[in-house]
Amino acid sequence: MNNTHPQKPITQQWDYIATSWALAALYNPFAQLAIGAVFWTATIMYVCFAQSAPAVTADCLNVLFTPWNILADLTGLPRAPHLTP
């Protein structure tokens, strides 16, 4: 008999399964907690132990201060400091 519904290649099937499982895992609050704990632990360890951490931390904080500085320029509020290591 002639099959009217062609089957997808196995690689596309596995990609779909892996993607659906990954997305389902991200809705799990325990998985979210574990991912957050790993992220913050790695971030704190980097800031505490890396030699380049002060420069990178200053750059990240400067990026976070950018919206505040734009708002400060528009409204006349005081600007956030520009951090240098």
Image: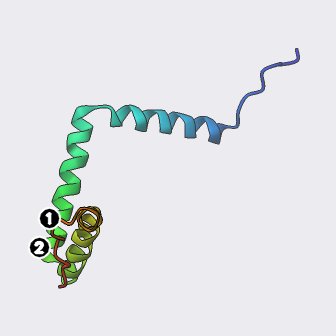
Tell me the tag on residue 54.
none
Q: Which mark is residue 48?
A: 2
Left or right relative to 9: residue 66: left
The residue under label 1 is: 44
Quarter of the image where the C terminus is located: bottom left
Would residue 34 be found to the left or right of residue 25 on screen? Answer: left
Q: Amino acid at mark 2?
A: Cys
Indicate the quadrant where residue 65 lies.
Answer: bottom left
Q: Residue at x 16, y 72 (%)?
A: 47
Q: Quadrant of residue 68?
A: bottom left
- The residue lying toward the viewer, choosing from 16 and 79, is 79
* Residue in the image at 20% along x and 62% along y: 42
| Residue drawn at the location 16% of the way across and 58% of the way down | 41
Placement of 72 over or under 57, stated as above or below: above
| Label 2, residues with CA under 10 Å away: few <14, some 14-19, many ≥20 | few
State whether residue 29 is above or below residue 33. above
Cα distance between the residues tagged 1 and 2: 6 Å
Q: Disc 1 vs disc 2: Cβ atoms closer than 8 Å?
A: yes
Residue 31 lies left or right of residue 16; in this view the side is left
Vertical placement of 74 versus 6: above or below? below
| Foreground residue among 39 and 67 | 67
Q: Where's residue 25, x and y in %?
A: 35, 35
Position in image of residue 61 (x %, y %)? 21, 69
Q: Looking at this view, name the residue that lies furthest to the top.
A: 1
